[in-house]
Image (tube, helix red, strand yellow):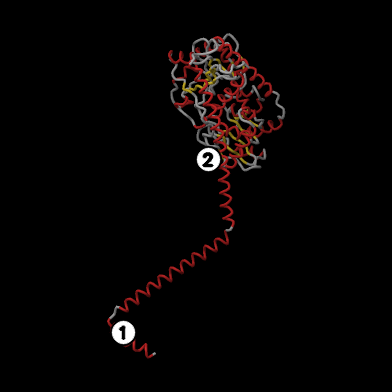
Amino acid sequence: MRAQHPHQPGGTLGLWCGGDLPGLGDQLLARVLERELTQRLGDWRVRALAPFGWTRPVRADGGHVAEPLGERTPGRVRELAESHHLHLVAPSFPLGSDLAGRYGEDVPARAFFTGGLGVEPDALWISAKVAEEVPAELVEWAARQPLASVRDEVSRERLRAAGLRHDVTVVPNPALLADRLLSASDLRTRVAQLRQLGQLPPEGQSYLVVQVPRTSFTALRPAVAKTAELLAIGEVVLLPTGGPVPDTGWRALPSDTVLEDRLAMLSGAAAVLAADEYVAAAAHAFRRRWVLFDPKGTDRAGVEQFASADRVVTRPSGLAAAFRRALRDDDDNLAPKAVHRLDEHLDAVAAEAERAFAARGGSLEPRLAALVEENRALRSAQQRLRERIVADRHVLIERLIAQREQDRERDDDGPELAEERRLHRELAERHREVLAQLDAERRELAAMRATRLFRWTRLLRAAYGKLR
């Protein structure tokens, strides 16, 4: 790790990601890489950049917003190159792919994820995935990089077939380091809060996490129920991918749940059924029993970098058998090696950042020093705010539970309280009847006193009263 001088700010990294999308993988990659790189580089600033960034915010980001990349114009490229020492690329989507289907609209920044910056030094790939159809610009971009890495062998073969002459490194999915984001105590606190909120089963009850696939969930549901029964797991909890949650009668996290709560949910699960390689890698990081449902085979190659291919199934009918194999797989030697390879590659990326920093004379324009200090203070304040929110939520839940207990105690006095209320209603009704009868008699007496006969006989009635 580079030695830091007390008043000398570090460099600036631009991290290209998909942080403006709501999926777990979209949020997880940027957060993991930011944490790992700052651990290695010390007082460096990592700026997340996404196609739309904060112009298209998602609540799932938990306040970790990304700057919009914008359109790939010469002016924007020059601005990005001059304000960063190095750019790193680790999106959740494949490089060179059509992003309109993923974002639901045209993406002006798509050219960045196909051709890079086009300057020296160009943006470096970190465990990237390559689209099935490789554009020529993508091959040229890879050829300009001294340290490009892809996520699986399929991506490497696609680049070779498209004409890339030099080799690229295959590095496992960075989501394998998800367990480093939160401490064990933070995870336990969040799991307890999710149980108190009713989003997870009560304490002592196990649950199977099922990531909702982007395709139809109808055919998968019976196999999920059978798998939960086979594993003797009490409940099923759905983990949304960012879209609507199907109505199954099972518990489900809200679609915009923040990353920390999703990780806590995975960390406390008895087993996990993943629908993409990010959830599979995160479940593996937390040492959960997991199986990947991959009907199209798009994520198999990525998973094979850290786990056995036996954990991947393409049909719902294969879930039960895959989980039985996972239960017997007590010592998977692939995962420690994959984490070691990933750590080594991130060390190399940090060294490349140091070289880029030195090549720029050790600093950018003087105004960036103030920005770095301001950024550090802002991030510290954001971290304290997030901790405060977690603590406040815990207090709120405790108060709600106490109020619920008081309501339950009042309900426990049901028979006596119901009889008392019945008698009170009868007494009130009788009181109303007496008042009505008294009012009627008063009206009748007043009417009688108003007659001539009553007035004319007043003296006779008075004398008769004295004689009595």
Classify 361 as above or below 325.
above
Q: Quadrant of residue 191?
A: top right
Report the residue at 56% width, 25% height from top.
Answer: 31
Q: Which mark is residue 247?
A: 2
Where disc 1 sits, the SS reads: helix
Horizontal side of residue 62 vs 432, given as left or right: right
Circle nearer the viewer, 2 or 1? 1
Where disc 2 sits, the SS reads: loop
In this view, the residue in front, 227 or 386, is 386
Q: Quadrant of the C terminus?
A: bottom left
In this view, the residue in front, 416 or 105, is 416
Classify 348 as above or below 230.
above
Earlier sequence position, callout 2 versus callout 1: 2
Q: Looking at the picture, which amino acid does disc 1 mark?
A: Arg
Q: Looking at the picture, which amino acid does disc 2 mark?
A: Asp
Report the residue at 58% width, 50% height from top.
Answer: 405
Report the residue at 57% width, 37% height from top.
Answer: 391
Q: Which mark is residue 458?
A: 1
